[in-house]
Image: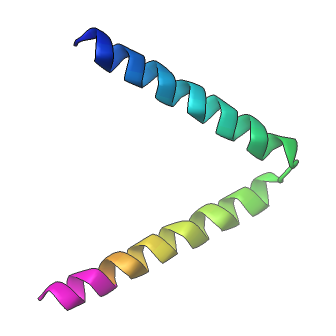
């Protein structure tokens, strides 16, 4: 693993910490977090299915 890879991994970890702290500062509950995660997952799968249907 090169030095540049380590820097990239540390930068991504830093951005993840910033994003999670911003998310927690809004005091979103666990139930709403699960609902939002399922909604984003369904949206992602829907878009992926549309692109797969167009590609064939």
Q: Quadrant where the C terminus lies?
A: bottom left
Residue at (36% x, 15% y) in the render:
6
- The part of the image, by quadrant, that contains residue 19 is top right
With 10 as the anchor, is 6 left or right in this view? left
Please indicate whether residue 28 sits to the left or right of residue 7 in the image: right
Residue 53, quarter of picture = bottom left
Q: Residue at x 30, y 19 (%)?
A: 5
Does 4 appear above or below 23? above
- Establish if 25 lies above or below 48: above
Q: Residue 12: horizontal and vertical position, in percent?
A: 48, 30
| In this rendering, position of residue 18 left or right of residue 29 | left
**Residue 54, quarter of the rendered image:** bottom left
State whether residue 11 is above or below residue 18: above
Q: Residue furthest front?
A: 4
What are the residue bounds of the magenta stretch?
A: 50-56
Locate residue 8, reporting x and y percent. 39, 24
Residue at the (27%, 82%) spot, across then down = 51
What count of labels does the image hold? 0
Q: Is residue 55 above or below residue 45?
A: below
Q: Residue furthest top?
A: 3
Q: Position of residue 1 (x, y in %)?
A: 22, 13
């Amino acid at each position: 693993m090169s030095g540049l890879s380590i820097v990239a991994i540390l930068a991504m970890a830093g951005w993840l910490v910033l994003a999670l702290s911003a998310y927690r500062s809004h005091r979103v509950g666990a139930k709403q977090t699960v609902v939002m995660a399922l909604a984003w997952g369904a949206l992602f799968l829907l878009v992926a299915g549309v692109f797969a249907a167009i590609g064939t």
